[in-house]
Amino acid sequence: MVWLVCTPQVFSQNGDHRPKIGLVLSGGGAKGLAHIGAIKVLEEAGIKPDYITGTSMGSIVGALYAIGYSPGQIEAIARSINWNELLND
């Protein structure tokens, strides 16, 4: 009975309300930089995630995007890094 009483409040949708969107970015080293392109496509479609999480390279790309860097700025940062120097012992 409680579920039936709460259902209208839980499932009602206001025209101004949109569902929350979460963006989950995986790792994969340099392959994780492909997330930059995915974020560009989301922006072009007008999709702005409410939550962003990731692992490994996905967490780096996600963190930069979450603090306000644009996909173009993140790409410029990725291109400016000397990856061989960074990853050598």
Image (cartoon, rainbow, N blue to C red):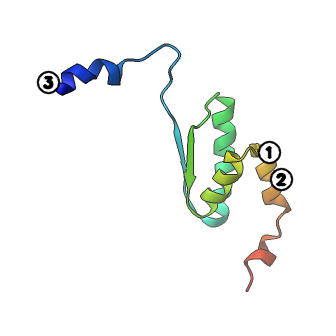
- Is the residue 15 above or below the residue 7 in the image? above
The three-letter amino acid code for the residue at tag 3 is Met
- Rendered image: mark on residue 1: 3
Q: Position of residue 81 (x, y in %)?
A: 82, 65
The three-letter amino acid code for the residue at tag 1 is Gly
Label 3 residue SS:
loop
Question: Residue at image x 27%, y 22%?
Answer: 7
Label 1 residue SS:
helix
Q: Is residue 79 left or right of residue 60?
A: right
Question: Residue at image x 62%, y 34%?
Answer: 48
| Separation of marks 2 and 3 at Cα, in angstroms | 56 Å
Q: Position of residue 64 (x, y in %)?
A: 71, 52
Question: Seen from this angle, which residue lies furthest right?
Answer: 80
* Residue that carries the numbered disc 1 in the rendered image: 72
Pointers 2 and 3 in contact (C-beta within 8 Å): no
Question: Seen from this angle, which residue lies furthest bottom?
Answer: 89
The three-letter amino acid code for the residue at tag 2 is Ala
Question: Seen from this angle, which residue lies furthest top?
Answer: 15
Q: Quadrant of the N terminus?
A: top left
Pointers 1 and 2 in contact (C-beta within 8 Å): yes
| Separation of marks 1 and 3 at Cα, in angstroms | 52 Å
Q: Position of residue 78 (x, y in %)?
A: 78, 58
- Neighbor class of circle 2 (other Cα within 10 Å; few <14, some 14-19, many 20+) is few
- Rendered image: mark on residue 3: none
* Residue that carries the numbered disc 2 in the rendered image: 76
Looking at marks 2 and 3 on the same chain, the residue that comes earlier in the sequence is marked by 3
- Neighbor class of circle 1 (other Cα within 10 Å; few <14, some 14-19, many 20+) is few
Q: Is residue 76 left or right of residue 7?
A: right
